[in-house]
Structure formats: structure tokens, C-alpha cells
Image (cartoon, helix red, strand yellow):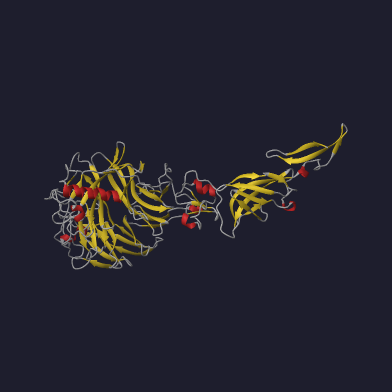
Amino acid sequence: MRVTAVAVLLASWWLPWLPALPSSLPAASSFQSESALNHLLLDPATGHLYVGAVDRLFHLSGDLELLSRGVTGPRMDSPDCLPPINRECQQATETNNHNKLLLLGAPREEGSLIVCGTVFQGICEKRSLGNVSVVLYRTENPVDTQYVAANDPRVTTVGVVVVAEELEEPLLFVGRGYTSKGPGGVPPITTRHLGGHNIFTHEELGKLVVGSYSEYNNNFVAALRAGGHVYFVFFRRDRRAKREYRTYVSRLCVGDRSFYSYVEVPLRCAAGEKVYNLAQATFLSTAEDGEATLYVVMAAGTASTPAPTRDTALCVFPLAELDGAIVRAQELCYEEEGRSEEAYIEYEVNSQCTRLLPDSVRSYPCGYEHTPSPIASSVPVETTPAVTMETQLSAVAATTEAGHTIVLLGDSQGQLHKVYSSETVQPGSPVSADLLLDDVREHVYVMTAFTVSKLPVSSCGRHTGCGSCLAARDPHCGWCVLQGSCTRKAECERFEQANHWLWSYRQGEECVAVQRVSPANRSRDEPTEVSLTVQRLPCLGAGESFSCMFGTLPGQPAVVTGTEVTCQSPPPEQVPPSDPGKDHVVVSLSLKFNGVAVAATEFIFYDCSAVSGLSVRAPITTPSQSLNTQYQCTYREGLRIALTATLM
């Protein structure tokens, strides 16, 4: 199944490595930690940030000021022992606690932060959002069904909190990779309680049953919620065909406590022979019309291993097309016995595709006791890269500006690519997959190994003229004609009206300019009407008008008729004098609105009296010619004053 084209703003070039943030950009706010950072979380209700680090938690303001901190380690622990750790665990040593999950608690549990680490077999606790040093819940004697996160820092864990009408309680959906140490039998995907006496357990809740845990070593990249479904993105070795690593998207109904609805489909992103098979980061974007799009950073693998190369790509999948592929796999497995294994049962469980009644998927969209599961599709959802890079991309986020989607990408070298340019955040330090935009989409929070930085999504204000604003080719910016400034679209008061906001990224966009001046010059002693031809001049409202300004002289009313603007030149006594030795003076001629120059050109006033030894229109009779000769003073552009003889 091939994905249809998705419109994303992508430049055809990338700026080279920048040694530091350009001096013309505003200085970024930053927070520095002595502990390695693992996860970054934004609370949209307050704008506060929460940082999960090795042995530490940090609570920051939107401007990255430290508000509170908490300690999570080190702890006496061993992955070979079950908590609580006592003297019987002789392998126990002081062990760092790496943060594996950092999530906001359910809304009804106001003020709670879910924190899960690698120690004590990956158990979780709840902390206060107002002060992360305050522990709201922690079990001292956890049972095996409360082991949530991977106990190995190298193994990924993802999660998403779901609150839905069809659920009796908020639930935590978790995906975790396989670890060789510690208790076996922790399913790769589980649903966890967030309240009651069995908090964080998966008792009486759904889990993905697996026949061989080591054989299904899912490397989880993301857990996402959209509508009535939860999605997981992961990659693993395909147990069929060539046993190559492939990326998958799986889906569950949020109200499905038995995982009857579980379906997974492979993703394929390729350009010619180059296949990008390993997902590295994702971002789910929802447009104003409700259409959701999944952005996936994918890397080409090293042979048949899960090790990514430097060849990476941004791959774009409309969620509706992923859902369509999932439903198609359900139909094949429910009603057509899988049709030559286009759909099949995965994870070595005792189930098989069958031939149920027609429309069974419509009758049981989330499955039921009699429907086969878990279902996998062998038919990938295919797309071509939206952009490729020879650097290891590690993060992705998307935003919209001027009705267009703009993608931000972070890489393993500490650079943030804003698709049309690059900025160095922290040289040599990978950008975390937790790339977050603030609620107004004006700043992006970027986390590297030890630093959280707050960067402006755009810096339109640093462009002081229309030419530099449009030359920047910045999708966030445009020239606001009547305000005379480079702004984001929403900051331009009349952006909805034609020719009021000129988008920087539009191919061939030009500033409002004077195309022609008639006349182009005039004697300083002869006031006249000057006509300007100005294309794409923005319209004004009732009672508003443009004015013409010659140099620094007071403005003169301008009359606009279509593309023609008529101005009256100033009286002779107001025209500035020519410089000594010059026979003309050049002044700026600006078309203004409320003091803002909308377009400008030059106008020349010539001065015949400055021509040495001549008087304008003075009759001169030569001995050889008895006729009077009248001399007319004129000015030609690029030439000095010319005297034209007329026989009288």
C-alpha cells in the first residue's frame, strides 16, 4: 500500500554546520545539568517543563528557571534481584537510576507526575507537579505485575496515559523492549492501572501475549493516542522472509481490555534501492481540519542489525492511510483466512485467521472473543522520503505557519534543522527525541545530553528590510507591507488581505516596488506632477491614504488609480540645493503609509543655473550669426545638463 503525497514545506538545500548560534539570533535560554538527561515533558496547563535525568528530576519554568528538584538515585540494586533489595541480594551495588518514563498523570489526579526508572525492575512512582521532591506514591514491596519499565538503560520504554469515556479509569499503556536480566515474562505491551489498590499493575487488564519474548524483541520508539486508538511505533527483526529489521505501527482500541483489537502493519520508506528501515523518532500532528499525520524519522540499518547508519530520512504517513491498512489486515484475517498470509497471526499464540461472516470488522471494529488476534500484515504501507540527510537524525516535531506544515529535525551532532536552515544547539551531543513546542508554537525546547535549550522557532524581527526578509526564505516569516516589518503571518494586522503580507518562502515573491517614474527628473524651478507605477500595492480602508515624500520634506497627498500613483513635486524653495560642483540633486521618493515606507525610488532635480557661464533661456548673439539663438536647459539621466539650441 503506497501513501499518497503529503504537502510539507521542505527546502531543497541545507545550510552547512554552524560553529555557534549566529550572533544575529536572540540568545537562547538554557538549563545545564550535571546529570545526563533522559526525558523532557511539557505541561500545557502551566507551561512548566519536567526533566527526567539519571538519578534526578528537575522542574523548570517556561524560561528554564529551576523551580524544584528531586532525587531518584542511586539505589542499592541489581537487575538479577527482585525488590525490595535486602542482604540476600549479594550482587546489589549502588546503581544509577535512569529515567525511562516521564508522563503527566490523569487530569482527575491533579498535580501528579508519573516517573519510572531502571532500578527495582522498572517500578514507577508518582511525584508532585508543584514540587518534584515530594513523592505522592511509591510501593515499598512491589509485585511482579508492577514491573513497568525496562531495567536496562539501553532498552527502550514508551508510554501514554489515556482517559476516555469508554474506560472506567485512566490507564497507562506501556511498550517496553526485552531485557535478558531479571524476571522474564513481562509482555512487550501492557495496560496499567493508575489508581486504586493495584496501581501500576496490569492485573485484569490487557497485555500482548508472546510465545517467545527474546524472539520478539521490539525496539519501541513511541506510544501515541489519537481518537479512540493507541498506537505504538517500533522496529524488530522480521521473523519471515529475509529476517531483516522492519519498522511497524500497531494499533489498539483504548477500551479494549483484552487486546482483541491488536493489529500491526509494517512501514516502508525507500528512495530507489535505499531503504530506511529503522524508526528513530516520531511526531503526530493534527491539522485544523482534524486530519492527523505521523512524521517518522527513519534510518538505514547496518546490514541485518538494529544499528542505524548516518543515512536518515523524514518519512510522512497520513494516519488515515495507516488506519486503512490496519482495517484491511483485519478484514483479510477475519473474513478471508489471511489471503495467502497477507495477514496472519503473530507472536506465536494459539489463534489463526479465519472466515467469519461478511462485515465482521464493521460489526466488531475492536474485535471480540471469537475474532482472531494478534493480527499482523505482511503488506507494508509505503512512502518515499520527504527529505534525506547524511547525518543521524534523532528527533522530529512539526508545526504550521501560514497554512503550511514546517518540520523541525534534531540530529546526533546537536544540530536543530528547521528544514530551511540549521542551528547548533550543543555540538556533538545528540538531540533528544523529546523535541517540544510551546503551546503558542513560538519556541521549541531542545534537549541534548546535559542541556535543555529554549529556541525561537523563528527570528523574523532580525530582518530589518523587505529584501532581507524575503531573501531569508524563512517559512515562518513574511514582510508586512503597511507595518514595514518582517513578521509572522498572525502578527501582520491585515494578513488576510491581498498584498499586505508577503511570504518569505514563496518562490518568486518580490517586495512592493516602484516600476516606473514619469518624469524621472525635473527642473528644480518647475513643480510638476510625478506619476509612479507600483504593482501589487495593498488596498487601504475608508479614510486612509498614501503620501509621497521627497527626501525629508513634508509628505504630499498621493492619488492612487489602479497601479498608478500621482504625487506633486515640492515648490522650488523647498528643493534641497545641489552640492558644490554638481548640476543636480538626487532625493529619495517614498510612498508612505502612516510614516512607513511602502515603496521607494529616486528622483532627480536638475539645476540649470549651476552650469558655469550660462543663463537659462538667455539669448546670445554671435558675430557670425545675426539670428537670436534660444538655449533650452534639459537633463538626461546619466548625463550632465544639455543645452538645446533653437533658432529664433
Q: Position of residue 344 (x, y in %)?
A: 17, 46
User: Is 175 above or below relative to 516?
Assistant: below
Q: Position of residue 273 (x, y in %)?
A: 29, 36
Q: Is residue 288 left or right of residue 587?
A: left
User: Which residue is at 48% across, 53% downward?
Assistant: 460
Q: Which corner quadrant holds the C terminus? A: top right
Q: Position of residue 329 (x, y in %)?
A: 21, 48
User: Is 376 above or below relative to 72?
Assistant: above
Q: Which corner quadrant holds the N terminus? A: top left
Q: Is residue 540 left or right of residue 324?
A: right
Residue that protrudes farthest toward the front in the picture: 358
Between residue 200 and residue 325, name the one nearer to us. Answer: 325
Q: Is residue 567 left or right of residue 77?
A: right
Is residue 364 among the parts visible in the rendering?
A: no
User: Which residue is at 13% across, 60% downward?
Assistant: 88
Mark count: 0
Residue that protrudes farthest toward the top in the picture: 624
Q: Is residue 630 left or right of residue 56?
A: right
Q: Position of residue 183 (x, y in %)?
A: 15, 55
Between residue 155 and residue 167, name the one nearer to us. Answer: 167
Is residue 597 among the parts visible in the rendering?
A: yes
